[in-house]
Image: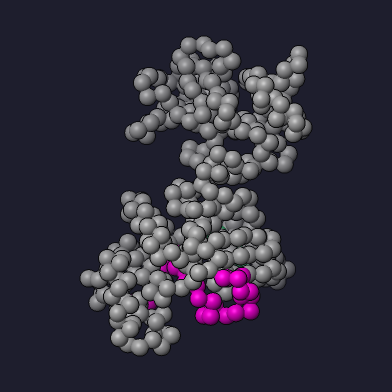
Amino acid sequence: MADVRLVHVTKVFRSGKRAVVAVDDLTLDIKDKEFFVLLGPSGCGKTTTLRLIAGLEVPTKGEIYIGGELVNDIPPKDRDVAMVFQSYALYPHMKVFDNIAFPLKLRKMPKREIERRVKEVAKMLHIEHLLDRKPAELSGGERQRVALARAIVRRPKVFLMDEPLSNLDAKLRVMARAYLKRLQRELEVTTIYVTHDQVEAMTMADRIAVMNIGRLQQVGTPNELYNKPANLFVAGFIGSPPMNFVEGVLREIEGKLFFDAKYFKIPLPSDIEEILRGQAPSEEVILGVRPEDMRISLEKVPEGIRGRIYVLEPLGTRTIVNVELGPELIVKVEGPREVDLRIGQEIWLTLDYNRIHFFDKKTEKAIL
Ligand SMILES: Nc1ncnc2c1ncn2[C@@H]1O[C@H](COP(=O)(O)OP(=O)(O)OP(=O)(O)O)[C@@H](O)[C@H]1O
Ligand SMILES: [Mg+2]
């Protein structure tokens, strides 16, 4: 039983005159038994956050609580957390058995109990037949399971996992994701999982915290982040292919509100008009539309946006159509299944107005 709480945690690394703010005023509330993912681009402070929770770094400011207890002054070995690193960090000279047994030996557990526990987790992770081998004699996927076994053998209060699947090939990674998610459900141990891969985050997490340059951008369930991104960064980071962005201005013409981009102008439905008026945004906005929230028509439609097919990207089950709306303005649209399209063809796009987003260009915050 352990929730994990970070309260206004900041970590500044100083070397000489330079100071890097790796984590900037981060407040997070991770629930007991939750599979919580920290997601963000390289250098955004994910590993540093995990190391702070593990006690491998000391916060510059703020408090960290595990299971309600303030752990700022508790050394790593007494925090009862287990960390799985990206590199697995197995001991190369030790057999698999001894690698898994290591944390138990450190705690001076009786030999028979160690043997029982190692065998139990080895069975759970399907690595019983590997116990006599050394890490060099294992595949990447097997090594990853050994590293997991070593983390779970002790049944810690919290698992901290730093991109544990990143060394696996694409196919194995997809399998390992589901496996790890299931394992976490069975063990019911609070897990904080770091990745820069938004698909991994979306598929595995109960909740995701998106970070950028040390700062928290948004916390929510995968669906909340996908459907209601709080800002331009989250909107562009989650989803593949990403959300399309088009800059423009909101313009009132004869009492009606229009979104006026350089190459097209569309009237906005009255409910959207009302929300945008209420929010009183600056005039300059960014329209955000996901590829699946636009429709392609071969015939001219009222309020359709005229474009030309730039290129087609078939993905097997669906095709991503790149549509040129003007010079240097190309949007990606999920294509219709039943229609054959060709490069250069003239088409009309319509938007699903229930699913479009607007962002304030200055603050980059969502206004719709
Ligand atoms: N020991 C350190 N000394 C100085 N700067 C550091 C140290 N550790 C990390 N940093 C800096 O802090 C920032 C955050 O690093 P961190 O390793 O937490 O990023 P990350 O999100 O894990 O990135 P990645 O996805 O590449 O692993 C980076 O700018 C990094 O250069
Ligand atoms: Mg990292």
- Measuring from the top left, give residue 262's x and y in whole percent: 66, 23
Give left or right: position of 86 versus 42. Answer: left
- Measuring from the top left, give residue 125's x and y in whole percent: 31, 66
Nearest the eye: 64 or 100: 64
Please tell me whether residue 73 belongs to the stretch shown in magenta: yes
Q: How is the image coloured?
A: one colour
Residue drawn at the location 57% of the way across and 18% of the way down: 305
Which image quarter holds the C terminus?
Answer: top right
Residue drawn at the location 60% of the way across and 60% of the way down: 29
Residue drawn at the location 51% of the way across and 29% of the way down: 293
Q: Is residue 39 visible?
A: no
Nearest the eye: 121 or 319: 121
* Quarter location, residue 134: bottom left
Give left or right: position of 62 versus 219. Answer: right
- Measuring from the top left, give residue 328's x and y in whole percent: 58, 28
Please tell me whether residue 136 belongs to the stretch shown in magenta: no
The magenta region covers 65-93
Give left or right: position of 292 versus 339. Answer: right
Can you name the residue that lies furthest to the left here? 129
* Quarter location, residue 70: bottom right
Q: Is residue 104 visible?
A: yes
